[in-house]
Image (cartoon, coloured by chain):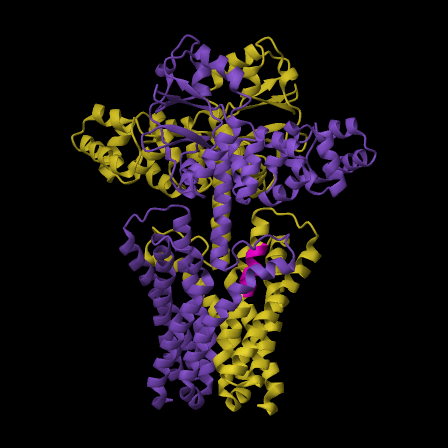
Chain colours: A yellow, B purple
């Protein structure tokens, strides 16, 4: 058995590359095919172009299709042109339709048509159907390779069916039962089948308590449902309850991973650039626009401070606490943002209603602000022994934190409701907004207290 | 079939509560037990104490154990005291050992001993074993309810075994084969069994290419492995390759969810407080320490600015760009932090090695800085027509962003390597650090240019 800790893996990879250099097909196939497709893909990714060429020669399209399925879209785009037209067509025919659709979704129309044309009619039809669904919906991530049963068939018949179709299907662990019109009627797990007697009819052992996903449901919602119920798969239906596909837990996992990365990008203004393995140039190209855009917002803060230049000139010391106040407001706002974004991501329900939740967040901000404000008041009073300054800074913190928490909480929710690009709600944007508000609060208070300083 | 869209669910919940008020046990059981345990738990959570009391009366410990398994730890802590000692013991006996262990892990020693004492010996033993493993390791999240096979048994014998033990096991989709010493020898999927002839011996159909997880592996690593290979379950082994448990994909999903929330908390200094449904007081109690701690760091920035008070007095306008420079450095640092934290979370490998990756990040920061710096230089030059100021601010941005990106990238990696509390690497801490550095850069440059202003 191939132990897959990295050391031993290394050795095997060396052997594989040796075999390729010696053009020793049998040794290559012996070792390489013994790996899990995920590992095969990993090894394949690290090969030189000419070595990749040999892989295509040494592996059947069917064997290579498993590797191709395990590649990232970008890696697939890289490999596809290296394949001969017929070889590629066979690879696509052997892939599951949803994986082909995901890949074609990233290509130009002409190429898509050419590839679909080269594929088996039946396969191409399924792929085309999947391509019709909007991106990021259940329909777009579901698979068509599922087994559906008639409620009238017996357990023995089903087992026989599994013998035949099992290898093709994406999963055989949940089997969905449909009526003569193809409408979802129930579900049978392989557990139920095995524990039932072979003459038993499906309708007597199936569960009619089926949690299903509408084909237009957002992919994240669909994935959360599968996670919530600990399902291995869930049926996807149309308005009239027709079973059109299934989503398996491994696809749900990938969706949740993808969405987590997205949320992360939003909160850090680094969307689509968190990949460690792109060049500095690529990374800078992706990230600079954010930074410059945010810098322009930042000019707003400069404007605010300029507006209070006279106040500053009278008490330059005030400048020293600009970062402190902005920082505290920023941090509190980010905390609220995290609460907000996480609650959206995990689909947490607002037990007490939205208004109450926002109010709770405001109260939280004021609470945090009052305590922090008091601390800084005493601190500045004692160390700088300037209680007026303490009052100004402390008071500003109370109000700024109250405001920051509401902004951090509500903006993502608003964005989400309006289905706008959530990046607008990203941490830095909210922080900049909070900066400006807290500076206004700070200098307004400071100016009004000026005569006492 | 109970369609689980929220409206219809509402109606059923009403009916359930009515039944409880009428103390109509049969109606209650009819409707309630028709729901998925996950939904039963959700409904149960929204009941009044006295209604919950009735639920314990109307449901057998076995029936309630499924609900109890679906509750959060906190909800379990709330419900447990409401149960009679014997009822509770039966509930625990019917739960899978890993869920009991997760619950007991949160209780005080004396209570744990008392509960274990009340449970069946065999069950209690399994739970105790799981409690021995460190938190957040594979051992702590694995389940003991798995089916292991002898390589000598036939497919028919295995099917027979599944009929008997199937209902107890956590999963029957992957069956692990062990030798006479209990060492992991291979794996058979139910697919293999169904497609094989019933006289076939397990050793002839099992795959010896088993990816296994060591019992001491970090839970996140384990979950990532299951995700990477699209497994439904993975075997957990000891040093001598003895099979001690399995981790199922649904547990892996929960771990990844938990870790994503943790990362989120780290980057936003809101660890453990992203729950929308806790009170303002609870939230403030969790979040205030962070804010105050960060405020103290913030005093560092005040100190820096104070140190350059004379510079500021000469050119008060300099204060106006403090937020801009700090903001840009903060945003770039946060982007780098996101790259770093995501790469740790998704276990992305540094194809080009760590040093090269950090260097890449530094180059990225300088690139972003140079472009942003140039933009602000021209902006200030033209609008404030003060190119010296532009040079100071622009130059500070170049250097600050370079520094910020390295800090944002490396600190999480260092923390991770040192196995320290990653919260230290949280966004706000890194941002505050970047604030201080960028202020030092800004005012040092400004002071040296003072004579030209």
- Which of these two is toward me, B349 or A78? B349
Q: Quadrant of residue B191?
A: top left
Using residue A242 as the reference point, say whether residue B129 is left or right of it: left
Between residue A435 and residue A112, name the one nearer to us: A435
Residue A36 place in picture, x, y as percent: 35, 30
Which range of residues does the magenta coloring cover?
A332-340
Left-right relation of B360 to A319: left
Quadrant showing the N terminus of chain B: top right
Image quadrant in which you'd find residue B325: bottom left
Residue in front for this viewpoint, A372 or A197: A372
* Residue A80 place in picture, x, y as percent: 35, 37
Q: Residue A41 appears at what percent x and percent y?
A: 33, 35
Is B452 covered by the magenta stretch? no
Identified at 45% across, 71% down, the residue is B297
Q: Is residue A339 part of the magenta span, yes or no?
A: yes
Q: Residue at x 42, y 64 (%)?
A: B430
x and y percentages locating residue A446 in the rendered image: 58, 84
Q: Is residue B131 above or below residue A167?
A: below
Question: Does A445 sit above or below residue A79?
Answer: below
Q: Main secondary structure of the magenta part?
A: helix
Q: How many marks?
A: 0
Tell me what residue is drawn at x 33 percent, y 46 percent. B349
Q: Please give left or right for residue B59 compared with residue A92 in the image.
A: right
Q: Is residue B242 visible?
A: yes
Please state, as top left, top right, bottom left or bottom right, where the C terminus of chain B lies in the image.
Answer: bottom left
Work out which residue is located at the far left of the displayed protein and give it: A22
């Amino acid at each position: 058995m191939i132990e897959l800790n990295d050391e031993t893996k290394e050795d095997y990879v060396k052997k594989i590359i040796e075999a390729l250099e010696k053009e020793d097909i049998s040794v290559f196939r012996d070792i390489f095919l013994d790996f899990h497709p995920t590992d095969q893909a990993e090894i394949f990714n690290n090969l030189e172009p000419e070595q990749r060429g040999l892989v295509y020669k040494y592996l059947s399209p069917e064997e290579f299709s498993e590797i191709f399925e395990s590649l990232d879209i970008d890696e697939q785009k890289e490999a596809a042109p290296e394949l001969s037209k017929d070889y590629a067509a066979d690879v696509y025919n052997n892939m599951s339709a949803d994986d082909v659709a995901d890949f074609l979704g990233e290509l130009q129309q002409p190429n898509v048509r050419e590839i679909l044309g080269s594929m088996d009619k039946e396969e191409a039809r399924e792929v085309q159907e999947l391509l019709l669904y909007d991106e990021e919906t259940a329909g777009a991530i579901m698979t068509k390779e599922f087994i559906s049963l008639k409620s009238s068939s017996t357990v023995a018949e089903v087992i026989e069916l599994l013998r035949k179709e099992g290898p093709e299907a994406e999963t055989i662990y949940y089997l969905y039962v449909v009526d003569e019109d193809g409408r979802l009627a129930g579900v049978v797990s392989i557990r139920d089948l095995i524990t039932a007697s072979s003459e038993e009819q499906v309708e007597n052992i199936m569960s009619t308590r089926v949690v299903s996903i509408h084909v237009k449901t957002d992919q994240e919602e669909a994935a959360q449902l599968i996670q919530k119920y600990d399902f291995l798969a869930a049926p996807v239906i149309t308005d009239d309850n027709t079973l059109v596909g299934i989503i398996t837990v491994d696809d749900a996992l990938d969706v949740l991973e993808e969405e987590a990365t997205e949320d992360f990008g939003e909160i850090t203004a680094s969307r689509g650039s968190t990949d460690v393995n792109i060049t500095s140039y690529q990374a800078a190209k992706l990230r600079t626009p954010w930074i410059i855009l945010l810098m322009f917002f930042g000019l707003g803060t400069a404007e605010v401070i300029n507006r209070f230049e006279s106040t500053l000139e009278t008490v330059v010391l005030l400048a020293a606490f600009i970062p402190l106040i902005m920082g505290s407001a920023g941090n509190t706002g980010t905390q609220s943002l995290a609460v907000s974004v996480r609650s959206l991501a995990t689909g947490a329900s607002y037990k007490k209603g939205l208004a109450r939740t926002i109010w709770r967040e405001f109260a939280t901000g004021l609470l945090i602000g009052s305590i922090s404000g008091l601390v800084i008041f005493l601190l500045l009073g004692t160390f700088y022994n300037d209680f007026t300054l303490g009052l100004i800074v402390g008071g500003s913190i109370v109000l700024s934190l109250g405001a920051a928490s509401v902004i951090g909480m509500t903006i993502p929710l608003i964005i989400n409701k309006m289905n706008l690009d959530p990046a607008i709600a990203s941490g830095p944007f909210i922080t900049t907004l909070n900066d400006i508000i807290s500076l206004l609060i700070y200098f307004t208070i400071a100016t009004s207290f000026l005569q006492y300083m």
